[in-house]
Image (spheres, grey):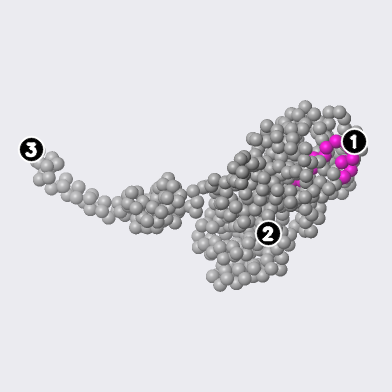
Amino acid sequence: MERQVAADGTGQRTGSAPYGAVGSSRRRDTTDARRRIPRTDDVLRDPRLTQAARRLGPRVVKEAVRQAQEQARNGGIPPEQVGDTAAALLPATAGGLRAVINATGVVLHTNLGRAPLSAAARQAVQEAAGPTDVELDLRTGVRARRGRTALRALHDRVPSAAAAHVVNNGAAALVLAATALAVGKDIVISRGEMVEIGDGFRLPDLLVSTGARLREVGTTNRTTVADYAAAIGPETAFVLKVHPSNFRITGFTRTAGTGELAQLGVPVVVDIGSGLPAPHPLLPEEPDADTQLRAGASLVTASGDKLLGGPQCGLLLGDAELVRTLARHPLARALRVDKLTLAALEATLTGPQTPTEAALAADPAHLMDRALRLVDVLGADGIDVRAVESAATVGGGGAPGVTLPSAALSLPESFAAPLRTGPVPVVGRLEAGRCLLDLRAVPQEDDERLADAVRSAARR
C-alpha cells in the first residue's frame, strides 16, 4: 500500500479507522483530570510559595508541591487545588521538629523535650542566634570568659555555690567530674543508688567508662555512714551520692545524708538529677542544690531542663577550686554548651516564672474551671467530651511518687491518633478506654488552640 503523508508533514497514515482511534484517545485524555495537574514551575509561581521558599528554602517548598500533585494524581484533591494544598502542607519552620501541646499530664515529658522554655528564654535564643559577645568584652575589645553572665546568674540563684560551670547535659556533668577527679581511682557509691538513667543507660557503666573504679557499699535498701567509712582509703577520689530520681524505695530503709558524708574527709559529689536550685514547697522530698551545698557537698551536679525549667544542659556547682579543675580539663571543651543554650539558661534564671513553675503551681480548681469551659464550647459542636478530675506527675526523673491533682478533657479513645497527627499536634494519654487531655502542663493561652485541635480531630 502506498504510504500517504499527512498535511502536517508527520508522515502518519491517514486511513479513517486509525485516525479515528487516535482522535478518540486524544478526546479521552482531555477529559482525564490528571492532565490538568499544573506543572511544578507553574505552581511555584504562586506568591505564597515564592515567599515560603525565601523563608523555608526551595527544597521544602518543592516537596510540598510534589505531595500536593501526588494527591491530585490519586484523586484526593481536584487539580485546581494543588496550589492551595501545597501552601497548607508547608511546615512552620525549615526544621523537622513540630511544636506540640503537652496534654499528657506529665509536666516534664522526656519524649516531648522536657521543660518548655519561657518567652524570655525564647527571645534570648533568638537574639543570640546572630553574632554575639559570647567570648568578647565589648568595653575592652579583648577576649572574655565564655558564658560569664549566665554563670553569674547561676551563682546568684544558688549563692551557696562558690563557682559554677555548665556542660551539655546532666550525664555529662557527672562524666566530667569522674574523668577529671577519679581516673584510676575509686568512687564510693551506695548499691541503692546504682540507677539506670533512661534509654538503657546505666550510671555504673557511665562512670566505669571514664576509667574510674566503683566501690559499692551497703545494700539496696540500707546504707549507713559506717559502710562508706569502711570503703574509704588512699585510692578514694570522692564519695558519690545519687538521687534515685525515677523510683522510690520504701519500708525498711536507711540512707546517709550529705552532712554525715561530708565528715569523712574526702570530697562528696551529689547528683541531685532534677536541677531544683532551692527547696520547693510542693516537693519537700526533692533534693535541691542549695541545701546540699550548705550541708557540705563539695560538688553538686544536675540537669538544667528539668525542675529548673531551662534548656538541656548540665550544671556543676560547688567548691571554687574543684569547679576550676573541671572547667580546665580537656574534656570540658568537648562538653561545652553553645551560645544559644547559655542565652536560654540565663534568661531562665533571671526572667519571669517559667512554664514548668507555672505548671507545678497551677490551682486544681482553676484547671477544672478551664476544663468545664472547654466542654461547653466543644459540646456545642456535638463532640463527646467531659471534664474529669485527673492526676498529673512531675516527670523527667523528678519527684517520683508525687501526684499533682489536675483536670482533663475526656474524649473517645479514637481521638488520640487524629489529635497527634493534626495541624496542631496534641499528645494526651489513654486511660480506661478514653483519651484524656490533661490541662496541668497546657498554658491557658493555648485553650483555644486545643479546642480547634479537638474540632479538627472530630472531623477526621
Mark number, residue 131: none
Residue 285 magenta-highlighted: no
Q: Nearer the viewer, mark 2 or mark 1?
A: 2
Question: Is residue 11 depicted above or below 363 in this figure?
Answer: above
Q: Residue at x 76, y 50 (%)?
A: 158
Locate residue 12 relative to residue 394 in the image: left or right.
left
What's the residue type where badge 1 is placed?
Answer: Ala
What's the residue type where badge 2 is placed?
Answer: Gln
**Whole-number angstrom distance, CA of label 1 to CA of label 3:** 112 Å
| Front-most of residues 347 and 413 | 347
Query: How would you rate the neighbour count of disc 3 (Cα within 10 Å): few for under 14, some for 14-19, many for 20 or more?
Result: few
Q: Which residues are magenta?
A: 257-273
Q: Earlier in the sequence, mark 2 or mark 3?
A: 3
Question: Is residue 408 depicted above or below 131 in this figure?
Answer: below
Residue 270 magenta-highlighted: yes
Q: Give the x, y percent position of residue 320.
A: 77, 40
**Whole-number angstrom distance, CA of label 2 to CA of label 1:** 43 Å
Badge 2 element: loop
Q: Quadrant of residue 122?
A: bottom right
In this view of the protein, can residue 352 be seen by the observer? yes
Say if mark 1 contacts mark 3, CB within 8 Å. no
Q: Nearer the viewer, mark 1 or mark 3?
A: 1
Mark number, residue 229: 1
| Front-most of residues 93 and 255 | 93
Residue picked out by circle 2: 353
